[in-house]
Image: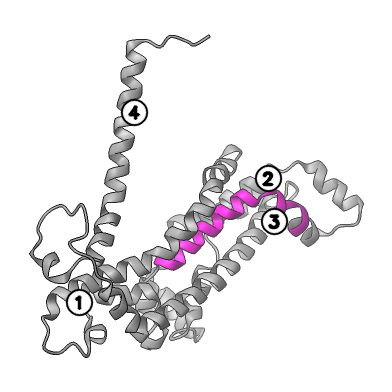
Amino acid sequence: MAIKRSIGEKIFDAFNVFIMILLIIVTLYPLLYVIFASVSTPSRLVKHDGILLAPLGFQLGAYKLVFKNPMITKGYLNTLFVVTVGTTINIIMTSLGAYVLSRKGLFWKNFMMIIIVFTMFFGGGMIPTYLLVRSLKLTDTLWALIVPGAISTYNMIIMRTSFASIPDSLEESARIDGAKDLTILFKIVIPLSLPVIAVMILFYGVGHWNSWFSALIYLRKRELYPLQLILREVLISSDTTQMLAGLAGMDLEPIAETVKYATIVIATLPILCIYPFLQKYFVKGVMIGALKG
């Protein structure tokens, strides 16, 4: 038997649908604008002003120019290295720290948590951090983008809470069978915490992919630049000279605009492709980490 809904409930549902549609439009339109602009005809794009609801013509010349730039390919490889290696180190370090802090019999556990939480709000600052990285001889290496951020306090606390929610009986059974801490961590705790692990991979991976400030500080060799730092040069410094080389005699300003948009799409596309596969774990993983303190 269908439940009859009141007029107030129908109005409330309609209002919610309207707000959600509005949020979807506000979220998606900037991305659609960039995609439409990247495939538009340059001469028509520079003359256009206002909202762009469809491509102005169609051409892929901007993408061809972007991929001709050797720095884009090099930036992609550098970024993939930082994301892959960095995220792997992040997950290992965060898992080890979270496992230790989730043990109920840990000596001075509360004191250690206070010290760890303290680092979320207070840090040495940019200059001391740079001096430390330089003293470790990590400047002008990709490790300078990985090692200083090997573990996130916030992420470790979320993972610790998730690990603490696993029944003690599983650990006790494993110990009776002779399992040590590393065996318990990698064969029991982590397999039972895959949703929160997926969330951590997403957090760390997106953080590494979007990071450019650390590279700006620690790297001087252009061949080590990650993709986002190259994107910054293209957008802020309008440095498209390498991509537009060989186009003498043409009006370069309209072409440069489409090249900028094409670079944004190329730099954003991988994360957009990966996110849907991890999205189903996102809410579940965060909620698991928020249930118990």
- The answer to the question of whether label 4 and label 1 lie on touching residues, with beta carbons closer than 8 A, is no
| Percent coordinates x, y for residue 184 in the rendering | 79, 55
Which SS class for mark 3?
Answer: helix
Is residue 8 toward the left or the right of residue 163 in the image?
left
- Considering depth in this image, is 13 or 1 the residue closer to the camera? 1
Q: What amino acid is labelled 1 in the image?
A: Ser
Q: Are marks 2 and 3 in contact (CB under 8 Å)?
A: no
Secondary structure, mark 4, is helix
Check disc 1: other Cα within 10 Å, few if <14, some if 14-19, many if 20+.
Answer: few
3D distance between C-alphas at marks 2 and 4: 37 Å
Q: Is residue 221 above or below residue 115?
A: below
Taking the magenta stretch, the answer to whether it contains residue 54 is: no
Picture residue at 11% right of the left edge, 54% below the top: 50
Label 3 crowding class (10 Å Cα cut-off): few <14, some 14-19, many 20+? some
Is 56 on the left-hand or right-hand side of 164? left
At 28% from the left edge and 72% from the top edge, which residue is drawn?
Answer: 60
Q: Which residue is mark 1?
A: 238
Q: What residue is pinned by disc 4?
A: 16
Q: Which residue is mark 2?
A: 164
